[in-house]
Image (cartoon, grey):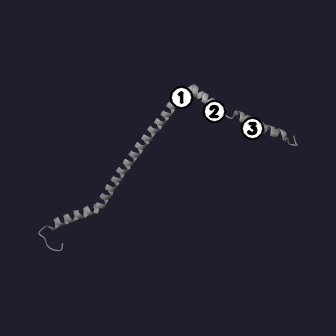
């Protein structure tokens, strides 16, 4: 010590050493606190991700259910008639174009045949 005091030197040394200990441990404690805060934030992040996935799953199931309900709510006779009409559109034109194609091959016989 620089000047004499009325306090015992052992007491001043103990206080000084405890102050040095606190200052020396401060970075480790600060990093520990930082790591705890990061772990907590990451945990909340994953909780939010799971909640979003659960909501998306519920929406997907609802959309599928609504689609099935719409399919089952259609009148089967009307649906069959519409499917038959849709299947017959263009049949005559397709057969005519196919016949024309066959006639062109028939008229152009190769000399080797």
- Circle number at residue 97: 3
**Tag 1 near tag 3, CB within 8 Å:** no
What residue is disc 1 on?
Answer: 74
Locate residue 100: give its quadrant. top right
Residue 70 x, y percent position in the rendering: 51, 31
First of labels 2, 3 by sequence position: 2
**C-alpha separation, residue under disc 2 versus residue under disc 1:** 17 Å
Q: Position of residue 56 (x, y in %)?
A: 45, 41
- The disc label shown at residue 86, or none: 2
Residue 84 is drawn in which quadrant?
A: top right
Q: Earlier in the sequence, mark 2 or mark 1?
A: 1
x%, y% of residue 29? 30, 57
Work out which quarter of the rendered image holds the C terminus and state it: top right
Q: Is label 2 in a helix, a strand or a loop?
A: helix
Whole-Å distance between the Cαs marked 1 and 3? 36 Å
User: How many numbered markers are drawn?
Assistant: 3
At which x and y percent is residue 11? 16, 65
- Would residue 43 appear left or right of 71 to someone viewing this image? left
């Amino acid at each position: 010590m620089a000047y004499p005091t009325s306090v015992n030197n052992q007491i001043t040394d103990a206080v000084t050493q405890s102050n040095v200990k606190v200052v020396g441990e401060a970075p480790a404690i600060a990093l520990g606190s930082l790591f705890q805060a990061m772990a907590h934030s990451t945990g909340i992040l994953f909780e939010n991700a799971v909640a979003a996935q659960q909501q998306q799953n519920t929406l997907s199931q609802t959309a599928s259910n609504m689609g099935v309900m719409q399919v089952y709510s259609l009148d089967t006779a009307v649906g069959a008639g519409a499917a038959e009409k849709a299947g017959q559109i263009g049949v005559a034109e397709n057969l005519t174009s196919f016949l024309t194609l066959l006639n062109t091959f028939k008229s152009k016989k190769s000399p080797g045949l």
